[in-house]
Amino acid sequence: MDDISAHQHDAAVARDLACLGLPPDNWPATVTGPDGAPVLDVLIVGAGMNGIAAAGALLFKGVRNIAVIDQAAPGREGPWMTYARMGTLRSPKTLPGPALGIPSLTYRAWHEARFGTADWERLYKIPNELWADYLGWLQRVLSLPVRHRNRLVALTPAGSHLRARLDADGAPQELIARRVILATGRGGAGGDAWPAFVDRTLAPERAAHTNDPIDFDRLRGQSIAILGAGASGWDNAATALEQGAARVDMYVRRPVLPQVNKGRGSAFPGFLYGWSALPDAERWRYMAYFNDVQSPVPHETVHRALAQPGFHIHLGHPVRAVARANDGVAVTLAGEAEPRRHDFLIVATGFQVDARAIPELADVAGDVATWGDRYTPPAALMRDDLARHPYLGPGFELTERIPGRNPALTRIHLVNHGAALSHTAIASDIPGVNIAAERVAGAISASLFCEDADAMRARVEAFDEPELQGTPFYVPSTD
């Protein structure tokens, strides 16, 4: 690493921000909570990619009375150094990352400053650990007010504001905020998806989800079943075998793996900007199509798993039941009377989206409007999983199932995987991160301005810098 170049790069960022006048002074009115103390304008939950971008976009709009919390330790935010068990990001290296339109904030600028242009040219895809380092640098260079080891426990209305109950490094704490952004990633929209036919009591001794911490050393020499053939399933298969598992059997419902990544085909500006303007029927039809075709596993991930002699894939073998079998796991396949025995099961069935299963919203979940509450598709397009998606407003805000029953919901902005049907994947995938940040920051800025209309008018009226002083036409103020 070239430390001199890194320092020069930090200085270049500072100059870019200064040239743009960023961040401007804070402008929202000072507002007090039920106890008379000033409250936060915005609390951002999650200091990963989307939380960083949202915080930066708010600061750049002069909304500076904010806080960012993350339950992880520094450097452990998001999935990159935990359950994301691939070696590199799946996205192309050329994506700018959460740069907010400023070239010196891009991943490429960061990488070249530390490792040189030649290293950037040689790079195929961005290694996970470097991406995590880059996101940590963004936190620092943007001076984001991040509080680590702070977990949001619950959100409840507090008059016209929101009360956030936290576990702050083991101690209970409360914050009052005017707006809350839940930038909680793919797992923050309802948790892991576990098929109903899997005996959940197998976990953690005999089963785990791909999103769980897994002690692969404990699985050395063992036979592992993997349920599902998404990218995380292949990543976990390769990781298990690389760390000494004897055999991995991947059971796949489909007879043929998906071949084309339609998500890549839709990651262009028109799609990312225009999606939320589509009629509900068109958004639903698109999402049903994406869910039906699914995304293929990246080719490099396939080669990684196939390089291990203990890897076995069983296409066209749907699983009917997974149960305990003495000191192991019994996997019963469709069309087979006798179950197949394994030592351990890894469930690779992704995340669910369920607006009413987000733990932080448990106290208000019954009032959250879902797509099932707002739209009824044709019978051929009925999808129970899509019906559970939250129905979000134009600024990612939750909406009320029954208008007027819980208006505080509109102060909660869901900038995570749960926004996919309302806003497409701009809140969960790298190509749209800057669009999501701009959209939520713009919506919050506008709503705070309207909410503070009297204070804004008073501020304008109080402005008294005389323009004509020193000219013959100057008239001193008599106020």
Image (spheres, grey):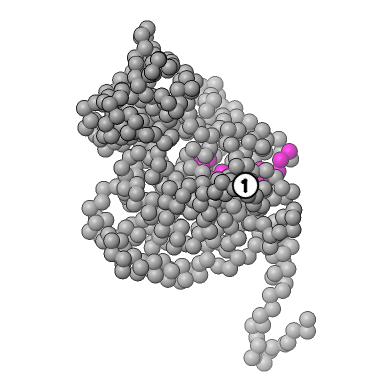
Q: Return the residue at label 1.
A: 172
Extreme right residue here? 479
Q: Nearer the viewer, residue 147 or 13?
A: 147
| Residue 124 position in % (x across, y down) | 26, 48
Q: Is residue 53 left or right of residue 242?
A: right
Q: Which of 248 and 113 is in front in this view?
A: 248
Amino acid, disc 1? Pro
Residue at 46%, 49% in the rendered image: 73
Q: Is mark 1 on a helix, strand or loop?
A: strand
Extreme top residue here? 337
Residue 114 magenta-drawn? Answer: no
Q: Is residue 118 left or right of residue 468?
A: left
Picture quarter with the C terminus: bottom right
Structural crowding at the residue carrying mark 1, measured as other residues with C-alpha within 10 Å and reported as few (<14), some (14–19) or many (≥20): few
| Residue 442 position in % (x across, y down) | 57, 55
**Snapshot quadrant of residue 25:** bottom right
Asked if residue 212 can be seen in this view, the reply is yes
Residue range in magenta is 405-420
Q: In this view, does 171 lie to the left or right of 273?
A: right
Residue at 67%, 57% in the rendered image: 39
